[in-house]
Amino acid sequence: MIAPGFTGGTLDRNDRVRHEPELLAAALDDPRARLLLLDGLVPQLDGEGRLVWTGLDAATQPLLFLGFIDGAPRFVQTLAPGAPLPPGRPPELSAILDAFRAEDAANYAAARSLIDWHARHGFCARCGTPTDIFRAGWGRLCPSCGTEHYPRVDPVVIMLAERGDRVLLGRQPSWPPHRYSALAGFLEVGESVEDAVRRETLEESGVRVGKVRYVASQPWPFPSQLMIACIGEALDEDIAIDPHELEHAGWFDRAQVRLALARAPEAPFLAPPGYAIAYTLLRAWAEGA
């Protein structure tokens, strides 16, 4: 099975630097230290399509420590105060993600999610006081009540329901024409991964699921989800979609899925992009996982 997108990063995150101010100071003073160059949240690329790292003197905002690559400290800067967070993924970013090298995509994902979290969590959730960056950028501390806040990851199940040699896929109206993909939804409090797969499949498509098996996971930096890919055993095949979630859903056999993954002109649907774990999940299923 191919590795999911946004995995395989080369950052040595080195948790000690986050806890020991003298180590952070040494990293900031290291002449090899580099800053990830972004335009807002969109990565800038060099002539070879790689991420651009520049000197720390280019920074205009507080720095966040990402880790080390080949022994050299790597940083990213926060957004300027009041800078708007771009909604969704702009077209130019989608094109970049399709061409990214695996390690660049993973390193960018870590940086993007961290920047986004700081932009959204400038105030204490307990008392409302503006918070300060601490632990090298991997936390915010409330100077009033002392509450510590840390970057959050929101778990999402993404799943295929299989019935014999067919699999259930759906499409949302906002997607490109003819695109179908795996169903997905956020885990709720007090819920296991398996229960979330069953609930979300039933809610969105009306199809009941029994046994559930885990396939893979993927960080999804829009803004900071963990996609948990599973395959569930469909107990029936009658579809009754929730129109608030899906525009359409249908059953597709392995031959049809393979045509879609190959981007064949005669494919019955447009497959997800290669960097999405839905693509990885479909490919694993098509290969008999």
Image (cartoon, helix red, strand yellow):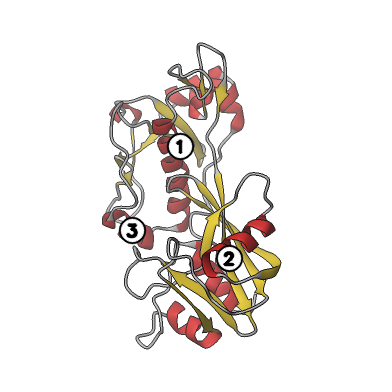
Which residue is more in the foreground, 13 or 154? 154
Q: Which amino acid does label 1 sit on?
A: Leu
User: Is disc 2 placed on a helix, strand or loop?
Assistant: helix
User: Is disc 1 placed on a helix, strand or loop?
Assistant: helix
Residue located 37% across and 24% down the image: 62
Location of mark 2 (residue): 201
**Residue 33 visible here:** no
Q: Which amino acid does label 3 sit on?
A: Ser
Q: Quadrant of residue 271?
A: bottom left
Vertical placement of 185 versus 64: above or below?
below
Q: How crowded is mark 3: few (under 14 residues within 10 Å), some or many (20 or more)?
A: few
Q: Which of marks 2 and 1 is nearer the N terminus?
A: 1
**Residue 54 place in picture, x, y as percent:** 33, 37
In the figure, is residue 151 to the left or right of 116? right
Q: Earlier in the sequence, mark 3 or mark 2?
A: 3
Tag of residue 94: 3
Whole-number angstrom distance, CA of label 3 to CA of label 1: 19 Å
Whole-number angstrom distance, CA of label 3 to CA of label 2: 27 Å
Q: Residues within 10 Å of mark 1 (few under 14, many from 20)?
A: many
Q: Quadrant of residue 267?
A: bottom left
Vertical placement of 220 versus 78: above or below?
below
User: Is disc 3 placed on a helix, strand or loop?
Assistant: helix
Of the residues tagged 3 and 2, which is closer to the observer?
Answer: 2
Whole-number angstrom distance, CA of label 2 to CA of label 1: 31 Å
Which residue is more in the foreground, 266 or 105? 266
- Identify the image quadrant of the C terminus: bottom right
Residue located 44% across and 24% down the image: 28
**Residue 284 visible here:** yes
Location of mark 1 (residue): 114
In the figure, is residue 12 to the left or right of 54? right
